Image (tube, rainbow, N blue to C red):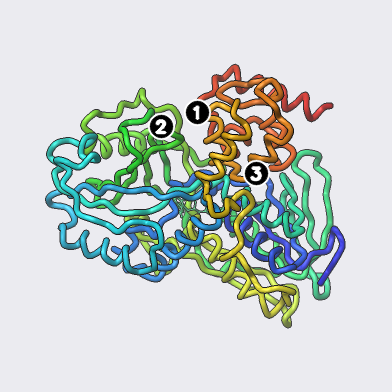
Amino acid sequence: MLTGKDRYDLFVIGGGINGAAVACDAAGRGLAVGLAEMHDFAEGTSSRSSKLIHGGLRYLETYDFKLVRDALREREILMAKAPHLVWPLRLVLPHVPGRRPRWLIRLGLFLYDHLAARKSLSASEAVNLANHPAGAALKPEFRRGFAYSDCRGDDARLVIANLLGAQRHGADIYARHRFVSARRDADVWAIELENRLTGERISIHARALVNASGPWVIGVGQTIDGVAATRRLRLVKGSHIIVPRQWAGEHGYFLQTGDGRTMEAFPFEEDFTSIGTTDEPWEEAPEAVAIADKEIDYMLAEVNRFLRRPVARGDIVWSYAGVRPLFEVGGARDSDLSTLTRDYSFDIDQREGKAAVLTIYGGKLTTHRRLAEDAMAKLAPFLQSPRRGRTVEETLPGGDFGDGGMAGFEAVLKRDFAWLPDGQRRRYARLYGTRARALLAGVQGIQDMGTHFGAGLYEREVAFLVETEWARFAEDIIWRRTKLGLRMTATEIACLEAALTRRRER
Ligand SMILES: Cc1cc2nc3c(=O)[nH]c(=O)nc-3n(C[C@H](O)[C@H](O)[C@H](O)COP(=O)(O)OP(=O)(O)OC[C@H]3O[C@@H](n4cnc5c(N)ncnc54)[C@H](O)[C@@H]3O)c2cc1C
Protein backbone atom coordinates (compact mmCIF):
# COMPACT_ATOMS: atom_id res chain seq x y z
CA MET A 1 0.00 0.00 0.00
CA LEU A 2 1.30 3.47 -0.89
CA THR A 3 1.49 5.86 2.01
CA GLY A 4 2.05 9.57 2.47
CA LYS A 5 -0.13 12.53 1.61
CA ASP A 6 0.79 12.62 -2.07
CA ARG A 7 0.80 8.89 -2.81
CA TYR A 8 -2.45 7.02 -3.06
CA ASP A 9 -3.57 3.55 -3.94
CA LEU A 10 -6.59 5.03 -5.70
CA PHE A 11 -7.37 8.52 -6.90
CA VAL A 12 -10.92 9.48 -7.86
CA ILE A 13 -11.77 12.29 -10.29
CA GLY A 14 -15.18 13.83 -9.56
CA GLY A 15 -17.11 14.57 -6.39
CA GLY A 16 -20.59 13.64 -7.57
CA ILE A 17 -22.40 10.67 -6.11
CA ASN A 18 -20.45 8.05 -8.04
CA GLY A 19 -16.99 9.41 -7.25
CA ALA A 20 -17.94 9.93 -3.60
CA ALA A 21 -19.29 6.37 -3.35
CA VAL A 22 -16.16 4.86 -4.91
CA ALA A 23 -13.95 6.84 -2.50
CA CYS A 24 -16.11 5.72 0.45
CA ASP A 25 -16.01 2.05 -0.56
CA ALA A 26 -12.27 2.03 -1.36
CA ALA A 27 -11.27 3.86 1.83
CA GLY A 28 -13.45 1.46 3.84
CA ARG A 29 -11.36 -1.40 2.40
CA GLY A 30 -8.26 0.16 3.95
CA LEU A 31 -6.85 1.66 0.75
CA ALA A 32 -5.16 5.07 0.66
CA VAL A 33 -7.66 7.17 -1.30
CA GLY A 34 -7.77 10.71 -2.67
CA LEU A 35 -10.62 12.46 -4.49
CA ALA A 36 -10.71 15.78 -6.35
CA GLU A 37 -13.77 17.84 -7.26
CA MET A 38 -13.34 20.97 -9.37
CA HIS A 39 -16.48 22.80 -8.18
CA ASP A 40 -18.55 22.27 -5.05
CA PHE A 41 -19.41 18.65 -4.29
CA ALA A 42 -22.60 17.54 -6.08
CA GLU A 43 -22.65 20.74 -8.11
CA GLY A 44 -22.77 18.65 -11.31
CA THR A 45 -25.60 16.20 -11.88
CA SER A 46 -25.82 14.91 -8.34
CA SER A 47 -27.76 17.84 -6.90
CA ARG A 48 -30.04 18.11 -9.94
CA SER A 49 -31.78 14.74 -9.97
CA SER A 50 -35.44 13.95 -9.35
CA LYS A 51 -34.24 12.74 -5.93
CA LEU A 52 -36.00 9.39 -6.21
CA ILE A 53 -34.30 6.35 -4.77
CA HIS A 54 -36.22 3.94 -6.87
CA GLY A 55 -36.21 0.84 -9.01
CA GLY A 56 -37.68 2.93 -11.81
CA LEU A 57 -41.12 1.55 -12.63
CA ARG A 58 -40.93 2.86 -16.18
CA TYR A 59 -37.70 0.98 -16.95
CA LEU A 60 -39.77 -2.21 -16.88
CA GLU A 61 -41.22 -1.02 -20.19
CA THR A 62 -37.75 -1.17 -21.73
CA TYR A 63 -37.20 -4.63 -20.20
CA ASP A 64 -34.35 -3.28 -18.00
CA PHE A 65 -35.24 -5.94 -15.39
CA LYS A 66 -31.71 -6.28 -14.01
CA LEU A 67 -31.40 -2.54 -13.47
CA VAL A 68 -34.80 -2.41 -11.75
CA ARG A 69 -34.03 -5.40 -9.52
CA ASP A 70 -30.60 -4.08 -8.53
CA ALA A 71 -31.99 -0.61 -7.87
CA LEU A 72 -34.86 -2.01 -5.76
CA ARG A 73 -32.31 -3.91 -3.66
CA GLU A 74 -30.28 -0.74 -3.23
CA ARG A 75 -33.40 1.10 -2.05
CA GLU A 76 -33.58 -1.21 0.98
CA ILE A 77 -29.85 -1.01 1.69
CA LEU A 78 -29.76 2.79 1.49
CA MET A 79 -32.78 3.18 3.78
CA ALA A 80 -30.82 1.24 6.42
CA LYS A 81 -27.49 3.00 5.80
CA ALA A 82 -28.84 6.54 5.85
CA PRO A 83 -32.45 6.68 7.08
CA HIS A 84 -32.22 10.47 7.38
CA LEU A 85 -31.30 10.84 3.71
CA VAL A 86 -33.48 8.13 2.14
CA TRP A 87 -37.10 7.74 3.19
CA PRO A 88 -40.27 6.06 1.87
CA LEU A 89 -42.58 7.77 -0.59
CA ARG A 90 -45.99 6.40 -1.53
CA LEU A 91 -46.74 7.20 -5.15
CA VAL A 92 -50.22 7.23 -6.65
CA LEU A 93 -50.57 6.44 -10.33
CA PRO A 94 -53.92 7.60 -11.77
CA HIS A 95 -55.22 5.35 -14.49
CA VAL A 96 -55.77 7.22 -17.78
CA PRO A 97 -58.23 5.60 -20.18
CA GLY A 98 -56.56 5.08 -23.56
CA ARG A 99 -53.05 4.98 -22.07
CA ARG A 100 -51.35 1.97 -20.46
CA PRO A 101 -54.11 -0.60 -19.75
CA ARG A 102 -54.88 -1.49 -16.13
CA TRP A 103 -53.73 -5.11 -16.55
CA LEU A 104 -50.32 -3.90 -17.76
CA ILE A 105 -49.88 -1.52 -14.82
CA ARG A 106 -50.99 -4.28 -12.43
CA LEU A 107 -48.41 -6.64 -13.97
CA GLY A 108 -45.68 -3.99 -13.78
CA LEU A 109 -46.45 -3.28 -10.14
CA PHE A 110 -46.52 -6.99 -9.33
CA LEU A 111 -43.00 -7.28 -10.75
CA TYR A 112 -41.96 -4.10 -8.95
CA ASP A 113 -43.20 -5.56 -5.65
CA HIS A 114 -41.48 -8.90 -6.17
CA LEU A 115 -38.26 -8.35 -8.15
CA ALA A 116 -36.39 -7.73 -4.89
CA ALA A 117 -37.16 -8.31 -1.22
CA ARG A 118 -39.04 -5.51 0.58
CA LYS A 119 -38.60 -5.19 4.33
CA SER A 120 -40.47 -2.08 5.34
CA LEU A 121 -42.18 -0.71 2.23
CA SER A 122 -45.80 -1.72 1.66
CA ALA A 123 -46.92 -3.52 -1.48
CA SER A 124 -48.79 -1.89 -4.33
CA GLU A 125 -52.59 -1.79 -4.39
CA ALA A 126 -55.42 -0.66 -6.65
CA VAL A 127 -57.13 2.44 -5.28
CA ASN A 128 -60.51 4.00 -5.87
CA LEU A 129 -59.63 7.67 -6.22
CA ALA A 130 -63.25 8.68 -5.67
CA ASN A 131 -62.81 7.94 -1.98
CA HIS A 132 -59.04 7.61 -1.50
CA PRO A 133 -57.39 10.70 0.12
CA ALA A 134 -55.05 10.99 -2.89
CA GLY A 135 -58.09 11.54 -5.13
CA ALA A 136 -58.85 14.92 -3.54
CA ALA A 137 -56.12 16.80 -5.42
CA LEU A 138 -56.98 15.16 -8.75
CA LYS A 139 -59.65 16.07 -11.29
CA PRO A 140 -62.79 14.00 -10.71
CA GLU A 141 -62.42 12.11 -14.02
CA PHE A 142 -59.48 10.20 -12.52
CA ARG A 143 -61.49 7.62 -10.62
CA ARG A 144 -59.23 4.59 -10.56
CA GLY A 145 -55.56 4.23 -9.92
CA PHE A 146 -52.79 2.39 -8.11
CA ALA A 147 -50.56 3.18 -5.17
CA TYR A 148 -47.06 1.78 -4.76
CA SER A 149 -43.94 2.35 -2.71
CA ASP A 150 -40.65 3.96 -3.63
CA CYS A 151 -38.21 6.20 -1.80
CA ARG A 152 -37.12 9.81 -1.86
CA GLY A 153 -33.63 10.93 -1.06
CA ASP A 154 -31.47 14.00 -0.65
CA ASP A 155 -29.06 13.65 -3.57
CA ALA A 156 -26.56 16.38 -2.63
CA ARG A 157 -26.44 15.29 1.01
CA LEU A 158 -25.88 11.66 0.01
CA VAL A 159 -22.76 12.89 -1.78
CA ILE A 160 -21.54 14.66 1.36
CA ALA A 161 -22.35 11.63 3.52
CA ASN A 162 -20.28 9.38 1.22
CA LEU A 163 -17.39 11.85 1.28
CA LEU A 164 -17.56 11.99 5.07
CA GLY A 165 -17.62 8.18 5.04
CA ALA A 166 -14.48 8.16 2.90
CA GLN A 167 -12.82 10.75 5.13
CA ARG A 168 -13.73 8.70 8.24
CA HIS A 169 -11.59 5.93 6.72
CA GLY A 170 -8.68 8.25 6.04
CA ALA A 171 -9.37 9.49 2.49
CA ASP A 172 -8.05 12.91 1.45
CA ILE A 173 -10.76 15.05 -0.11
CA TYR A 174 -9.51 17.80 -2.44
CA ALA A 175 -12.37 20.30 -2.60
CA ARG A 176 -12.35 22.75 -5.52
CA HIS A 177 -9.38 21.06 -7.15
CA ARG A 178 -9.50 20.39 -10.87
CA PHE A 179 -7.90 17.26 -12.21
CA VAL A 180 -5.63 18.58 -14.96
CA SER A 181 -3.89 15.49 -16.30
CA ALA A 182 -2.35 12.13 -15.50
CA ARG A 183 0.54 10.34 -17.15
CA ARG A 184 1.89 6.88 -16.56
CA ASP A 185 5.20 7.04 -14.71
CA ALA A 186 6.53 3.47 -14.48
CA ASP A 187 3.82 1.63 -12.55
CA VAL A 188 2.04 4.66 -11.04
CA TRP A 189 0.06 7.64 -12.27
CA ALA A 190 1.66 11.07 -11.99
CA ILE A 191 -1.34 13.32 -11.47
CA GLU A 192 -1.60 17.07 -11.65
CA LEU A 193 -4.33 18.98 -9.84
CA GLU A 194 -5.11 22.68 -9.89
CA ASN A 195 -6.46 24.51 -6.85
CA ARG A 196 -9.38 26.45 -8.38
CA LEU A 197 -9.19 29.18 -5.78
CA THR A 198 -5.46 29.93 -5.77
CA GLY A 199 -4.35 28.58 -9.16
CA GLU A 200 -1.68 26.52 -7.38
CA ARG A 201 -0.69 23.24 -9.08
CA ILE A 202 -0.20 20.08 -7.02
CA SER A 203 1.50 16.84 -8.12
CA ILE A 204 0.46 13.54 -6.59
CA HIS A 205 0.83 9.87 -7.44
CA ALA A 206 -1.59 6.97 -7.40
CA ARG A 207 -1.52 3.31 -8.38
CA ALA A 208 -4.98 3.44 -9.92
CA LEU A 209 -7.32 6.13 -11.19
CA VAL A 210 -11.10 6.32 -11.41
CA ASN A 211 -12.70 8.75 -13.85
CA ALA A 212 -16.06 9.49 -12.17
CA SER A 213 -16.61 12.85 -13.84
CA GLY A 214 -20.17 12.12 -15.01
CA PRO A 215 -21.12 14.32 -17.98
CA TRP A 216 -17.47 15.44 -18.28
CA VAL A 217 -16.18 11.88 -18.60
CA ILE A 218 -15.05 12.06 -22.22
CA GLY A 219 -13.16 15.36 -21.87
CA VAL A 220 -11.48 14.24 -18.65
CA GLY A 221 -10.55 10.93 -20.31
CA GLN A 222 -8.69 12.87 -22.99
CA THR A 223 -6.36 14.29 -20.33
CA ILE A 224 -5.41 10.82 -19.10
CA ASP A 225 -2.34 9.54 -20.90
CA GLY A 226 -3.09 6.88 -23.49
CA VAL A 227 -6.77 6.40 -22.67
CA ALA A 228 -9.31 6.45 -25.48
CA ALA A 229 -13.07 6.68 -24.93
CA THR A 230 -14.87 3.62 -26.26
CA ARG A 231 -18.43 4.87 -25.83
CA ARG A 232 -20.50 7.67 -27.14
CA LEU A 233 -22.04 9.59 -24.30
CA ARG A 234 -25.47 11.16 -24.75
CA LEU A 235 -26.22 14.13 -22.56
CA VAL A 236 -29.93 14.24 -21.80
CA LYS A 237 -31.26 17.30 -20.04
CA GLY A 238 -33.90 16.99 -17.35
CA SER A 239 -35.53 19.94 -15.56
CA HIS A 240 -37.75 20.40 -12.52
CA ILE A 241 -39.98 23.15 -11.21
CA ILE A 242 -40.72 23.76 -7.52
CA VAL A 243 -44.02 25.36 -6.50
CA PRO A 244 -45.75 25.89 -3.13
CA ARG A 245 -47.25 22.73 -1.64
CA GLN A 246 -50.22 21.65 -3.79
CA TRP A 247 -51.93 19.06 -1.61
CA ALA A 248 -52.08 17.76 1.95
CA GLY A 249 -50.60 14.35 2.68
CA GLU A 250 -47.16 12.90 2.10
CA HIS A 251 -47.96 10.92 -1.07
CA GLY A 252 -46.72 11.85 -4.53
CA TYR A 253 -48.13 11.19 -7.99
CA PHE A 254 -46.64 9.20 -10.84
CA LEU A 255 -48.26 10.72 -13.90
CA GLN A 256 -48.55 9.35 -17.43
CA THR A 257 -47.89 12.18 -19.87
CA GLY A 258 -49.62 12.77 -23.21
CA ASP A 259 -46.45 11.81 -25.15
CA GLY A 260 -46.19 8.38 -23.50
CA ARG A 261 -43.56 9.42 -20.92
CA THR A 262 -44.04 9.71 -17.18
CA MET A 263 -43.53 12.50 -14.65
CA GLU A 264 -43.54 12.69 -10.88
CA ALA A 265 -44.93 15.30 -8.52
CA PHE A 266 -44.32 14.98 -4.78
CA PRO A 267 -43.97 16.99 -1.56
CA PHE A 268 -40.63 18.78 -1.31
CA GLU A 269 -38.99 20.40 1.70
CA GLU A 270 -42.26 20.28 3.70
CA ASP A 271 -43.90 23.38 2.17
CA PHE A 272 -43.30 22.80 -1.53
CA THR A 273 -44.10 20.45 -4.42
CA SER A 274 -41.52 19.19 -6.90
CA ILE A 275 -42.68 18.59 -10.49
CA GLY A 276 -40.52 16.93 -13.14
CA THR A 277 -38.85 15.87 -15.22
CA THR A 278 -38.15 16.32 -18.92
CA ASP A 279 -35.92 14.44 -21.39
CA GLU A 280 -34.24 16.77 -23.89
CA PRO A 281 -31.10 16.23 -25.94
CA TRP A 282 -28.26 18.47 -24.75
CA GLU A 283 -25.36 19.19 -27.10
CA GLU A 284 -23.66 22.04 -25.22
CA ALA A 285 -21.21 21.98 -22.32
CA PRO A 286 -22.73 20.33 -19.22
CA GLU A 287 -22.18 23.46 -17.11
CA ALA A 288 -24.27 25.56 -19.52
CA VAL A 289 -27.43 23.56 -18.82
CA ALA A 290 -30.54 25.60 -18.01
CA ILE A 291 -34.27 25.05 -17.99
CA ALA A 292 -36.04 26.21 -21.20
CA ASP A 293 -39.42 27.94 -21.39
CA LYS A 294 -40.85 25.10 -23.44
CA GLU A 295 -39.93 22.62 -20.68
CA ILE A 296 -41.82 24.75 -18.15
CA ASP A 297 -44.83 24.90 -20.50
CA TYR A 298 -44.66 21.13 -20.96
CA MET A 299 -44.49 20.35 -17.25
CA LEU A 300 -47.28 22.78 -16.35
CA ALA A 301 -49.53 21.45 -19.12
CA GLU A 302 -48.95 17.84 -18.11
CA VAL A 303 -49.42 18.30 -14.38
CA ASN A 304 -52.50 20.46 -14.95
CA ARG A 305 -54.17 17.65 -16.91
CA PHE A 306 -54.32 15.85 -13.56
CA LEU A 307 -54.55 18.41 -10.76
CA ARG A 308 -57.92 19.86 -9.75
CA ARG A 309 -56.29 23.19 -8.79
CA PRO A 310 -54.08 24.25 -11.69
CA VAL A 311 -50.47 25.27 -11.15
CA ALA A 312 -49.56 28.59 -12.80
CA ARG A 313 -46.23 29.82 -14.11
CA GLY A 314 -46.29 32.51 -11.43
CA ASP A 315 -46.36 29.81 -8.73
CA ILE A 316 -42.86 28.63 -9.61
CA VAL A 317 -40.47 29.50 -6.78
CA TRP A 318 -37.42 27.64 -8.06
CA SER A 319 -36.36 25.52 -10.99
CA TYR A 320 -33.27 23.54 -11.84
CA ALA A 321 -31.87 21.56 -14.74
CA GLY A 322 -29.24 18.86 -15.02
CA VAL A 323 -27.80 16.53 -17.64
CA ARG A 324 -27.93 12.79 -17.39
CA PRO A 325 -24.67 11.25 -18.58
CA LEU A 326 -26.16 8.31 -20.50
CA PHE A 327 -24.36 6.11 -22.95
CA GLU A 328 -25.63 4.49 -26.09
CA VAL A 329 -26.05 0.78 -26.26
CA GLY A 330 -27.33 0.55 -29.80
CA GLY A 331 -27.68 3.91 -31.53
CA ALA A 332 -30.86 5.30 -29.98
CA ARG A 333 -32.42 8.26 -31.80
CA ASP A 334 -33.41 11.57 -30.15
CA SER A 335 -37.00 10.43 -29.92
CA ASP A 336 -35.82 7.50 -27.79
CA LEU A 337 -34.01 9.56 -25.16
CA SER A 338 -36.21 8.46 -22.29
CA THR A 339 -35.45 4.84 -23.20
CA LEU A 340 -31.63 5.10 -23.15
CA THR A 341 -30.45 2.80 -20.38
CA ARG A 342 -29.92 4.31 -16.92
CA ASP A 343 -27.54 1.48 -16.05
CA TYR A 344 -23.81 2.01 -15.69
CA SER A 345 -20.83 0.42 -17.35
CA PHE A 346 -17.07 0.58 -17.01
CA ASP A 347 -13.99 0.65 -19.18
CA ILE A 348 -10.75 -0.49 -17.67
CA ASP A 349 -7.41 0.43 -19.17
CA GLN A 350 -4.08 -0.86 -17.85
CA ARG A 351 -0.55 -1.53 -19.07
CA GLU A 352 0.89 -4.89 -18.06
CA GLY A 353 -1.29 -4.96 -14.99
CA LYS A 354 -0.05 -1.58 -13.75
CA ALA A 355 -1.39 1.96 -13.40
CA ALA A 356 -4.97 1.04 -14.20
CA VAL A 357 -7.70 3.56 -14.94
CA LEU A 358 -11.37 2.77 -14.58
CA THR A 359 -13.84 4.98 -16.45
CA ILE A 360 -17.45 5.12 -15.26
CA TYR A 361 -20.23 5.66 -17.80
CA GLY A 362 -23.81 6.37 -16.78
CA GLY A 363 -25.35 5.28 -13.50
CA LYS A 364 -28.20 6.41 -11.28
CA LEU A 365 -28.23 8.09 -7.91
CA THR A 366 -29.98 4.97 -6.57
CA THR A 367 -27.25 2.55 -7.65
CA HIS A 368 -24.19 4.52 -6.45
CA ARG A 369 -23.26 2.08 -3.66
CA ARG A 370 -23.56 -0.90 -5.93
CA LEU A 371 -21.65 0.87 -8.70
CA ALA A 372 -18.80 1.54 -6.25
CA GLU A 373 -18.74 -2.11 -5.18
CA ASP A 374 -18.62 -3.25 -8.82
CA ALA A 375 -15.91 -0.69 -9.61
CA MET A 376 -13.78 -2.04 -6.76
CA ALA A 377 -14.31 -5.60 -8.01
CA LYS A 378 -13.01 -4.50 -11.43
CA LEU A 379 -9.98 -2.87 -9.82
CA ALA A 380 -9.29 -5.81 -7.49
CA PRO A 381 -6.54 -7.32 -9.74
CA PHE A 382 -4.59 -4.04 -9.45
CA LEU A 383 -5.22 -3.15 -5.81
CA GLN A 384 -4.88 -5.62 -3.00
CA SER A 385 -7.30 -4.27 -0.41
CA PRO A 386 -6.44 -4.98 3.23
CA ARG A 387 -10.15 -5.48 4.05
CA ARG A 388 -13.30 -6.57 2.27
CA GLY A 389 -15.85 -3.96 1.27
CA ARG A 390 -18.46 -3.27 3.93
CA THR A 391 -20.74 -0.67 2.48
CA VAL A 392 -23.81 -2.92 2.75
CA GLU A 393 -23.69 -3.02 6.51
CA GLU A 394 -21.87 0.21 7.41
CA THR A 395 -24.10 3.22 8.06
CA LEU A 396 -23.13 6.49 6.46
CA PRO A 397 -22.01 9.24 8.89
CA GLY A 398 -25.12 10.51 10.67
CA GLY A 399 -27.12 7.36 9.91
CA ASP A 400 -26.29 5.47 13.12
CA PHE A 401 -29.66 5.93 14.85
CA GLY A 402 -29.67 2.56 16.60
CA ASP A 403 -32.84 0.72 17.59
CA GLY A 404 -34.87 3.86 18.26
CA GLY A 405 -34.49 4.93 14.64
CA MET A 406 -34.75 8.50 13.53
CA ALA A 407 -37.89 9.13 15.61
CA GLY A 408 -36.03 8.00 18.74
CA PHE A 409 -33.13 10.30 17.91
CA GLU A 410 -35.48 13.24 17.39
CA ALA A 411 -37.05 12.54 20.80
CA VAL A 412 -33.59 12.62 22.40
CA LEU A 413 -32.80 15.90 20.62
CA LYS A 414 -36.09 17.30 21.94
CA ARG A 415 -35.20 16.27 25.46
CA ASP A 416 -31.65 17.62 25.36
CA PHE A 417 -32.30 20.76 23.33
CA ALA A 418 -35.84 21.66 24.41
CA TRP A 419 -35.35 25.28 23.28
CA LEU A 420 -34.86 24.24 19.65
CA PRO A 421 -38.00 24.99 17.58
CA ASP A 422 -39.71 21.83 16.24
CA GLY A 423 -39.08 22.64 12.56
CA GLN A 424 -35.44 23.34 13.24
CA ARG A 425 -35.00 20.08 15.14
CA ARG A 426 -36.65 18.10 12.34
CA ARG A 427 -34.49 19.83 9.77
CA TYR A 428 -31.25 19.10 11.63
CA ALA A 429 -32.21 15.45 12.12
CA ARG A 430 -33.16 15.07 8.46
CA LEU A 431 -30.02 16.78 7.10
CA TYR A 432 -27.33 15.73 9.55
CA GLY A 433 -28.76 12.68 11.33
CA THR A 434 -26.83 11.94 14.50
CA ARG A 435 -24.19 14.50 13.46
CA ALA A 436 -26.72 17.10 14.62
CA ARG A 437 -25.31 16.45 18.11
CA ALA A 438 -21.92 17.75 16.98
CA LEU A 439 -23.59 20.81 15.47
CA LEU A 440 -25.32 21.52 18.79
CA ALA A 441 -22.49 20.50 21.13
CA GLY A 442 -22.24 22.90 24.05
CA VAL A 443 -25.14 25.08 22.86
CA GLN A 444 -27.42 26.01 25.77
CA GLY A 445 -30.01 28.07 23.96
CA ILE A 446 -30.80 30.04 20.84
CA GLN A 447 -28.55 32.87 22.14
CA ASP A 448 -25.52 30.59 21.58
CA MET A 449 -26.35 29.96 17.92
CA GLY A 450 -24.86 33.25 16.71
CA THR A 451 -26.11 35.50 13.92
CA HIS A 452 -29.46 34.55 12.38
CA PHE A 453 -29.16 34.84 8.59
CA GLY A 454 -32.84 34.01 7.97
CA ALA A 455 -35.12 30.96 7.60
CA GLY A 456 -33.58 29.34 10.69
CA LEU A 457 -30.01 29.43 9.40
CA TYR A 458 -27.72 30.47 12.25
CA GLU A 459 -24.00 31.18 12.33
CA ARG A 460 -23.49 27.94 14.24
CA GLU A 461 -24.82 25.80 11.36
CA VAL A 462 -22.85 27.85 8.84
CA ALA A 463 -19.64 27.21 10.80
CA PHE A 464 -20.50 23.49 11.01
CA LEU A 465 -20.94 23.34 7.23
CA VAL A 466 -17.74 25.28 6.53
CA GLU A 467 -15.66 23.32 9.02
CA THR A 468 -16.97 19.81 8.44
CA GLU A 469 -18.62 19.76 4.99
CA TRP A 470 -16.34 21.82 2.73
CA ALA A 471 -18.95 24.60 2.22
CA ARG A 472 -17.38 27.86 1.08
CA PHE A 473 -19.94 30.04 -0.67
CA ALA A 474 -23.58 30.90 0.09
CA GLU A 475 -24.75 28.76 -2.85
CA ASP A 476 -23.09 25.66 -1.36
CA ILE A 477 -25.06 26.19 1.83
CA ILE A 478 -28.45 27.29 0.55
CA TRP A 479 -28.81 24.90 -2.42
CA ARG A 480 -26.69 21.84 -1.74
CA ARG A 481 -26.01 21.36 2.02
CA THR A 482 -29.54 22.65 2.72
CA LYS A 483 -32.41 23.90 0.55
CA LEU A 484 -32.87 27.08 2.58
CA GLY A 485 -32.54 29.07 -0.65
CA LEU A 486 -36.25 28.31 -1.06
CA ARG A 487 -37.01 30.40 2.03
CA MET A 488 -34.33 33.08 2.23
CA THR A 489 -34.62 36.55 0.70
CA ALA A 490 -31.99 37.98 -1.67
CA THR A 491 -30.85 40.35 1.10
CA GLU A 492 -30.44 37.51 3.58
CA ILE A 493 -28.42 35.52 1.03
CA ALA A 494 -26.19 38.54 0.36
CA CYS A 495 -25.59 38.91 4.13
CA LEU A 496 -24.65 35.23 4.33
CA GLU A 497 -22.19 35.62 1.44
CA ALA A 498 -20.64 38.69 3.08
CA ALA A 499 -20.27 36.80 6.38
CA LEU A 500 -18.58 33.87 4.58
CA THR A 501 -16.16 36.27 2.90
CA ARG A 502 -15.37 37.90 6.26
CA ARG A 503 -14.88 34.47 7.78
CA ARG A 504 -12.36 33.51 5.08
CA GLU A 505 -10.46 36.76 5.50
CA ARG A 506 -10.17 36.41 9.29
C1 LIG B 1 -32.92 15.41 -14.43
C2 LIG B 1 -32.33 14.21 -13.78
C3 LIG B 1 -33.11 13.43 -12.95
C4 LIG B 1 -32.55 12.31 -12.34
N1 LIG B 1 -33.31 11.62 -11.46
C5 LIG B 1 -32.79 10.55 -10.82
C6 LIG B 1 -33.55 9.89 -9.83
O1 LIG B 1 -34.64 10.32 -9.47
N2 LIG B 1 -33.02 8.80 -9.26
C7 LIG B 1 -31.79 8.32 -9.61
O2 LIG B 1 -31.42 7.29 -9.09
N3 LIG B 1 -31.02 8.96 -10.51
C8 LIG B 1 -31.48 10.07 -11.12
N4 LIG B 1 -30.73 10.77 -12.00
C9 LIG B 1 -29.39 10.29 -12.32
C10 LIG B 1 -28.34 10.76 -11.31
O3 LIG B 1 -28.59 12.07 -10.88
C11 LIG B 1 -26.97 10.70 -11.97
O4 LIG B 1 -26.78 9.43 -12.52
C12 LIG B 1 -25.85 10.93 -10.97
O5 LIG B 1 -26.06 12.11 -10.24
C13 LIG B 1 -24.53 10.99 -11.71
O6 LIG B 1 -23.52 11.18 -10.77
P1 LIG B 1 -22.02 11.29 -11.19
O7 LIG B 1 -21.22 11.28 -9.94
O8 LIG B 1 -21.71 10.25 -12.21
O9 LIG B 1 -21.93 12.68 -11.98
P2 LIG B 1 -21.88 14.17 -11.38
O10 LIG B 1 -22.77 14.36 -10.23
O11 LIG B 1 -22.08 15.10 -12.53
O12 LIG B 1 -20.41 14.28 -10.84
C14 LIG B 1 -19.29 14.42 -11.67
C15 LIG B 1 -18.39 15.45 -11.01
O13 LIG B 1 -17.14 15.47 -11.68
C16 LIG B 1 -16.63 16.78 -11.56
N5 LIG B 1 -15.58 16.98 -12.52
C17 LIG B 1 -15.67 17.02 -13.87
N6 LIG B 1 -14.47 17.23 -14.41
C18 LIG B 1 -13.58 17.34 -13.38
C19 LIG B 1 -12.16 17.58 -13.29
N7 LIG B 1 -11.41 17.78 -14.38
N8 LIG B 1 -11.58 17.62 -12.06
C20 LIG B 1 -12.32 17.44 -10.93
N9 LIG B 1 -13.67 17.24 -10.97
C21 LIG B 1 -14.27 17.17 -12.17
C22 LIG B 1 -17.86 17.64 -11.82
O14 LIG B 1 -17.70 18.97 -11.33
C23 LIG B 1 -18.95 16.87 -11.11
O15 LIG B 1 -19.21 17.35 -9.80
C24 LIG B 1 -31.22 11.94 -12.61
C25 LIG B 1 -30.43 12.73 -13.43
C26 LIG B 1 -30.98 13.89 -13.99
C27 LIG B 1 -30.11 14.79 -14.81
Residue under numbered circle 1: 486
State which quarter of the image contains the N terminus: bottom right
Residue 273 in percent (x, y) is at 38, 35
N-terminal-most mark, 3 or 1: 3
Residue 434 in percent (x, y) is at 62, 45
What numbered label is drawn on residue 272?
Answer: 2
Q: Residue at position x 17%, y 43% from top?
A: 129
Q: Nearer the viewer, mark 3 or mark 1?
A: 3
Are circles 2 and 1 on residues that touch, CB within 8 Å?
yes
The residues bearing labels 2 and 3 have C-alpha atoms spaced at a distance of 26 Å
* Amino acid found under the numbered disc labelled 1: Leu
Q: Residue at position x 64%, y 30% from top?
A: 474
Q: Decide which of 186, 167 is in the foreground and name it.
A: 167
The answer to whether residue 407 is seen in the rendering is yes
Looking at the image, residue 214 sits to the left or right of residue 113; the answer is: right
The residues bearing labels 3 and 1 have C-alpha atoms spaced at a distance of 23 Å
